[in-house]
Amino acid sequence: MRSRRKRFARATSFRGMPAAVVTGSSRGIGRAVAVRFARDGYDVAINYRTNERAAEETAAEIAAETDGEAVVVRADVADVADAERLVDRTVDAFGGVDHVVNNAGIEESCPTEELSTADFDRLVDVNVNSAYAVTRAALPALRRATDPSGPSIVNVASRIAFTGAADEAHYVASKAGVVGLTRSHALEFAPDVRVNAVAPGKIDTDMNAHHSPADRRHKSRSIPLGRYGTAAEVADSVAYLRDASYVTGETVHVNGGETMR
Ligand code: NAP
């Protein structure tokens, strides 16, 4: 579906389109967000760490189906220098940054007594320190942004940041950190930049590919809507927060009602 969004007279990017950077957009939720933004009229920086082919597929999907332009940037966003380079490449490609989606993340289940300090540090670096680094690097460009919906940041947290989860204390701590970062940055950057989060429940991506069919049936019973969500359904909420000009510091839950159980 081609974008119906009009070009802006004073839009940030060289082409007269607003621009976004989506971390971890080679696959899963990040890919769906990148494609959704491109459909809505944004130029998008596609970021990956290892999976170049998947990142190029995201860019090809954008080229084939939207008016948006994509630039593919390899960057390990857990590395501060890489995070800064990702933002620089986006500004070089498009002339600015109007929106940031801090989506890159990893999950692993491991009992606390078995988790190495190095593995704990790595997960926290990828899931929360990266959001801090990308946000800090993008702030000057965001403050110059001209997208009429106002510059914004959307961070990707998780349902279990609010419930806790056995054997996932490190992941839960990192995602609770993302929620705290969201509220604190919303206060710190207001009124210039809005900062919100989405908290997905069980979403059908590679992250959950190890769930067997029986496991999925069992887990779906605790979801009122009775199924895993899709990456596109999370992207809908990210797009809502991008455009929600009077919403900041909030977390939108996208979990089929699972937090009610
Ligand atoms: P996914 O399918 O495993 O995709 C992860 C993406 O993050 C890939 O594009 C990957 O790039 C990228 N990535 C990982 N580490 C990176 C790094 N250090 N630097 C740059 N990119 C990196 O995961 P997903 O399910 O879409 O999850 C996206 C976000 O949603 C994560 O923050 C996750 O914690 C959160 N979330 C997911 C669920 C769920 O059920 N799926 C639920 C709650 C929250 P490569 O392709 O190069 O590896």
Image (cartoon, rainbow, N blue to C red):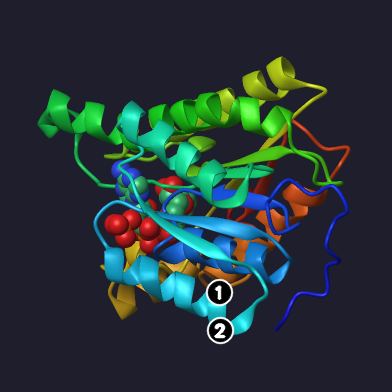
Residue depicted at x 88% and y 53%: 9
Residue depicted at x 32% and y 79%: 213
Residue depicted at x 32% and y 39%: 166
Residue depicted at x 68% and y 71%: 39
**Residue 12 vs residue 160: left or right?**
right
Q: Quadrant of residue 172?
A: top left
Q: Secondary structure at mark 2?
A: helix
Distance Cα–Cα, label 1 vs label 2: 5 Å
Asked whether the beta carbons under mark 1 and mark 2 sit within 8 Å of each other, the answer is: yes
The three-letter amino acid code for the residue at tag 2 is Ala
Report the residue that reaches farthest toward the top.
188
Give the tally of numbered discs: 2
- Residue 135: x and y, percent? 54, 30
Q: Is residue 132 above or below residue 224?
A: above
| Disc on res. 62 | 1
Crowding around mark 2 (Cα neighbors within 10 Å: few <14, some 14 to 19, many 20+) is few
Residue labelled with disc 2 = 64
Res 156 seen here:
no
| Disc on res. 143 | none
Crowding around mark 1 (Cα neighbors within 10 Å: few <14, some 14 to 19, many 20+) is many
Q: Quadrant of residue 53?
A: bottom left
The three-letter amino acid code for the residue at tag 1 is Ile
Q: Is residue 141 above or below residue 6?
A: above
**Residue 140 vs residue 247: left or right?**
left
Q: Is mark 2 within 8 Å of ligand 1?
A: no
Res 217 seen here:
yes
46 or 129, nearer to the observer: 46
Q: Is residue 162 above or below residue 29?
A: above
- Residue 70: x and y, percent? 53, 64
